[in-house]
Image (cartoon, helix red, strand yellow):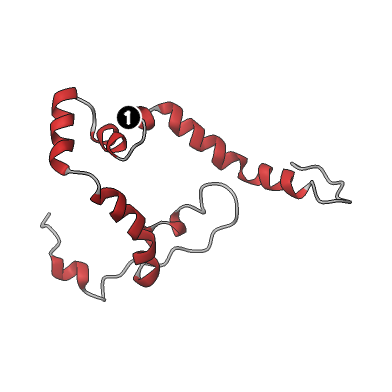
Amino acid sequence: MPLMSHTVLTDPEFSVPPVPDSPPGGVTWLRPSVARFSSGTVHRRRRAPAVAALASVDPGSLRLRAAERGDGPVEVLAEALGLPADIADEATANRIGVLVQACDATKALVADTVPGRTDPPVP
């Protein structure tokens, strides 16, 4: 498969398709909230923090660390960004899962603190 050229990447005919609106809760909020699935001004705003974080990382030192320690690329990059190297472990995925699954329940619990409200927080 041929590599995409810079021309294709900058051609306005080849744009990112819009992400459909998603219901609140769950993980569906993530896709329309990241730079990868946006374009124009929104893309530039969302991309800026990622670019700034990556600008602080020297690719050469990443290669060196990965070769010396035998860590995978995610672990080495995570550590270079100030995160624990084990962020890519199964435990992290499960913590994210808890946060995603708790979205609706937590929102309902917060709403349940409204005076006069008597319905159960989680139906």
Residue that appears at 24% across and 51% down:
55
Residue that appears at 54% across and 58% down:
22
Image location (x, y in percent) of residue 100: 55, 42
Residue that appears at 41% across and 67% down:
18
Kindly tell me whether residue 38 is visible in this rendering.
no
Q: Quadrant of the N terminus?
A: bottom left
Left/right of residue 113 with respect to residue 101 in the rendered view: right
Left/right of residue 114 with respect to residue 34 in the rendered view: right
Furthest-left residue in view? 2
Mark 1 surroundings: few (<14), some (14-19) or many (≥20) residues within 10 A: some
Task: Give the vertical position of 74 relative to 54 (above or below).
Answer: above
Closest to the observer: 8 or 43? 43
Identity, as a three-letter code, of the amino acid under mark 1: Ala
Q: Label 1: state its secondary structure.
A: helix
Furthest-bottom residue in view? 12
Image location (x, y in percent) of residue 45: 38, 64
Q: Quadrant of the C terminus?
A: top right
Label count reads 1
Kindly tell me whether residue 50 is visible in this rendering.
yes
Left/right of residue 77 with respect to residue 118 in the rendered view: left
Image quarter of residue 5: bottom left
Image location (x, y in percent) of residue 98: 56, 35
Residue that appears at 13% across and 28% down:
67
Task: Give the vertical position of 109 relative to 3 (above or below).
Answer: above
Image location (x, y in percent) of residue 30: 47, 52
Task: Give the vertical position of 40 relative to 51 (above or below).
Answer: below
Image quarter of residue 8: bottom left
Closest to the observer: 108 or 20? 108
What residue would you read off at disc 1?
85
